[in-house]
C-alpha cells in the first residue's frame, strides 16, 4: 500500500470527536488582553441598582462601573475619571442616571514598581441627543 491510501485516507473507520488534538499543534497566539485598546460601552446602572438602599446607590454605581471595566478589559487596576464620577453623582446620591455611556481605555502602566503592567481608565463618553438606543459597543481609534 502506498502512503495516503487505505481506509484512513478515505475517511472510513476514522472518527474525530473533537479538535483537541489540533490545539497542541496550533501556533501560539498573542493574548488580546495585553493589547492597548479603547472601547465605548453603555452601562445599564438601573439594572445594577435595583433594590439598593437610597443612600448607597451612587457609591454602588461607581463600584459597579469599576467591576464592569475589570470584567471587560481583564485588568485589576481600574481608574475612574472625575467627569464620570460627577456624571454618576449629578442627580444626587439617590437618583443615579439609568444609563451611562463610558469609554474604557486599557493603558500601559508607566510606574515601575506597579504590580500590574496594564490599567483601565474609565471616562464618560458623549451620547448623541441623549439617546442610548442602538449605540452598542464600539472600538475607539485614538
Image (cartoon, rainbow, N blue to C red):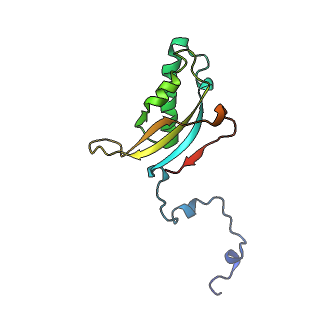
Which of the 4 image quarters holds residue 19?
bottom right
Percent across and percent down for residue 21 are: 56, 62
Residue at the outermost left position = 113
From the viewer's perspective, is residue 90 above or below residue 127?
A: above
Q: Residue at x 57, y 59 (%)?
A: 20
From the viewer's perspective, is residue 137 above or below residue 23?
A: above
Percent across and percent down for residue 15 are: 68, 64
From the viewer's perspective, is residue 131 above or below residue 94?
A: below
Percent across and percent down for residue 10 are: 72, 76
From the viewer's perspective, is residue 92 above or below residue 114?
A: above
Percent across and percent down for residue 37 are: 48, 49
Residue at the outermost bottom position = 2
Q: Residue at x 58, y 17 (%)?
A: 95
Q: How many marks?
A: 0
Q: Nearer the viewer, residue 10 or 36?
A: 36
Q: Nearer the viewer, residue 72 or 122?
A: 122
Q: Is residue 61 left or right of residue 7?
A: left
Q: Residue at x 32, y 41 (%)?
A: 115
**Quadrant location of the N terminus?**
bottom right
Q: Residue at x 53, y 18 (%)?
A: 57
Amino acid at each position: 500500500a502506498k502512503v495516503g491510501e487505505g481506509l484512513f485516507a478515505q475517511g472510513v473507520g476514522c472518527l474525530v470527536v473533537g479538535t483537541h488534538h489540533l490545539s497542541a499543534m496550533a501556533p501560539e497566539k498573542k493574548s488580546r488582553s495585553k493589547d492597548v485598546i479603547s472601547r465605548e460601552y453603555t452601562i445599564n446602572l438601573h439594572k445594577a441598582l435595583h433594590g439598593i438602599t437610597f443612600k448607597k446607590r451612587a457609591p454602588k454605581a461607581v463600584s459597579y462601573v469599576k467591576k464592569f471595566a475589570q470584567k471587560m478589559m481583564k485588568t485589576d487596576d481600574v481608574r475612574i475619571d472625575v467627569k464620570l464620577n460627577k456624571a454618576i453623582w449629578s442627580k444626587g446620591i439617590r437618583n443615579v442616571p439609568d444609563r451611562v455611556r463610558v469609554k474604557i481605555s486599557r493603558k500601559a502602566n508607566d510606574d515601575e514598581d506597579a504590580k500590574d503592567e496594564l490599567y483601565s481608565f474609565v471616562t464618560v463618553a458623549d451620547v448623541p441627543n441623549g439617546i442610548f438606543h442602538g449605540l452598542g459597543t464600539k472600538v475607539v481609534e485614538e
